[in-house]
Amino acid sequence: MGRELVTGNHAAGHALAAAGEANRFARGCCGGAYPITPQTEIIELLRGFTFTKGRIVPVESEHSAMGACIGASLNGARAFTASSSNGLAYMAENVFAAGYYRLPIVMIAVNRTLGPPWNIWVDQGDSLMLRDAPWMQFYTGSHQDLVDTILLAFRVAEDARILLPAMVAMDGFVTSHTQMGVNLPEQALVDRFLPPCSIPHRLNTAHPTTIGGLTWPKETERHRRDIEDAMQRVPDVWREAADEFSSVFGRRPDGPIVAEGAEDADVVLVACNTMVQTARRAIQKRREAGQRIGLVKLKMFRPFPRELLRRTLGRVPRIGVLDRNHSPGSGGIFAQELAASLQGRSDCLLQDYIVGIGGGDVTPEVIDEILDDLLRRKTAEAPVWKEVAA
Amino acid sequence: MSCHSPDGVGMTCDHLLRAGNTNCAGCGMSLGLRWLEDALGQEMPFLVIPACCGIVTAGAFPTTAYGVPTAASTFASAASVGTGIAVVNELNGDSTPVVCWAGDGGTYDIGVATVSGAAERNENILYICYDNEVYGNTGGQRSSATPEGVVTSTTTRGKVERKKDIMGIMAAHRIPYAATLSLAHRDDFLRKLAHARGVRGFKFLLMLSPCPTGWKAEPEDSVDLIRDAVQCGLFPVYEVMDGTRYRINVQPDGASVEEYVARQRRYGGARTDLPRLKAEIERQWSWLRTLEREFPAREDEGSVAAGPPGGRESEAALIAPR
């Protein structure tokens, strides 16, 4: 396979197909396919792929795309799909159901602004709408990061200690429709990296059970607590999986967070997806000019890597968060999560910037303006709106 | 489903629907699920049941009244979850039948797009709608299956709209097999299930399901009410092959629709517009007879080819509890 120049959607479709194909010696794979911009290429690619033991069902809605994944996973297959924006909103009920069933389904979320009004460009409001669903969430900043994270997502999701679905997000158009050089994984390596998918509670005539029936508060409390416990195990399982990934593919995947010059920094920006690359460039120039500015790329959002962030940002006096999302009446979601992680640190100025909503172009100049503001300010205030498209 | 002990005594065996389920007395599901088991014989299905009375039937975790692998899906998702299960069965050469068991809310209303999608794709699913013509699980609200004139908690002066013709909708999908099931006609019921088992693709079976609480009727009248509904012509018993060839399985004997209506307080007693109801029955039968005359089933196709499994003919004996 080697290194190829492909779009983010192509890279994601390839990774999903390879993961599905890798389960051909077990119970095969199945996915639901329903188009929505900017994700559509992924399901087109999946529909065009010839699986040895798999079928991609061209369903009639996103709700049914996840329904078909649930059925397939309940019957022991590796299951996956992709969606965006209002498609994720329409799917939401079954997104929650998939996690509550403890099914290791993997979904690509190509981030797009929720409508109306209709806007096909990127922000993270769609996948973050599902932040309280029992799903792992990973945000990816480059094509390679995307491919690697998808494969890791299957491995971690299907681990017997986890058994939770995983969502892998990328920026609509900025990632999905641009081409970058990617090491697309060869099937033989994916076969080695992904063990046969095993769903211990799958439907089984030898051991009939009722999955998803009624429970009382007692069992429901335990069920939710079990999910939380599984979430807390994710970082360790991820680390093991990443080690295995390195030995199979010969490259190290990005970790749950990637910190660049954060330890001794006076100021750190926290961002996700492609804004990280833009910020990196702007920060590089400033570092060359002697400013001690760091960068934290946040990949793992669920579970939220609280400890890791606390360790990394523990002594940083000024933190700016780039939130390409907005929770009306509250602010940016990443900043809220980070503030909760750093609670008790009264010495830290944490400023939220809501930026790039609806696909507004976040350029290095925008990052510069944000850094200027962050360096200048005496106190943190309500989220600052950067209307970059004006 | 491991046994049908001839005497039914000393049961160590399991059933599709176990004793201790939470169904109300006189619920059509109790009989329907038992006959489903009878039709499947030794074969265990995968059941998919959306949010409805059918999953409440199971009782609460960790116990369950279902003796077969059962997935409780979200309300609109029986046919999509069934799709995923059926696809993986096929990938693995597993012939376990996938049975979706859903009410009228999950079929006519919230799930209609899902059912339509699975039917259009001709997924290998046996879809059974137990139609009690009301949202029973939430306490008796109108659905699009509720007949005109019927009083529910959301149609307190009687429903204004007519009942949706779901059989017409399903037949229009040209699925290999669509049929109605009467709980007062066991042989026909079992023949249809036996036939459906042998058909590849999407099978849709519509069972009129008495609901004493929703129909405001006596539990012991349940089967009689279905017999009356069939015999007065309100609920035609027929089957459609490939959406194009029709066979009427039971000719109504002209039973009194007045009697049917009078035994259910949901019809609002004297306020029921009987002439209108009779005209609707006439219209329905004129339409159905025309279809059967112009587009008849071939003599050897459909449920006529299948004998009643188990050879047990007595209907009365089977209504008694196991």
Image (tube, coloured by chain):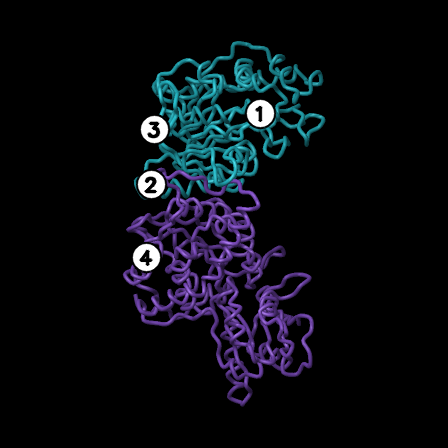
Mark 2 and mark 1: span between their CA atoms?
A: 36 Å
Q: CA distance from mark 1 to mark 3?
A: 29 Å
Q: Quadrant of the N terminus of chain A?
A: bottom left
Give the crowd class for mark 1: few <14, some 14-19, many >=20 residues within 10 Å: many
- Shade representing chain A: purple
The 10 Å Cα crowd at callout 3, few under 14, some 14 to 19, many 20 or more, is few
Q: Are marks 3 and 4 in contact (CB under 8 Å)?
A: no
In this view of the protein, can residue B293 be seen by the observer?
Answer: no
Q: Quadrant of residue B261?
A: top right
In the image, what residue occupies the spot 43% across and 36% down? B47
Q: Position of residue B33 (x, y in %)?
A: 46, 27
- The residue beneath circle 4 is A195
Q: Check if mark 1 and mark 3 are on a common chain.
A: yes
Residue A311: x, y in percent? Answer: 52, 75
Image depth: mark 2 or mark 1 in front: 1
Label whose residue precedes the other's in the sequence (2 or 3): 3
Mark 3 chain: B
Which element is circle 1 on?
loop
List the residue tagged with mark 2. B90
Amino acid type, callout 3: Gln
Residue type for callout 2: Glu
Residue at disc 2, secondary structure: helix
- Residue B66 quadrant: top left
Mark 1 vs mark 3, foreground winner is: 3
Q: Which corner quadrant of the image does residue B34 belong to?
A: top left
x, y (%) of residue A121? 55, 62
Q: Quadrant of the C terminus of chain A?
A: bottom right
Label located before the other in sequence (2 or 1) = 2
Per the image, the residue denoted by label 3 is B42
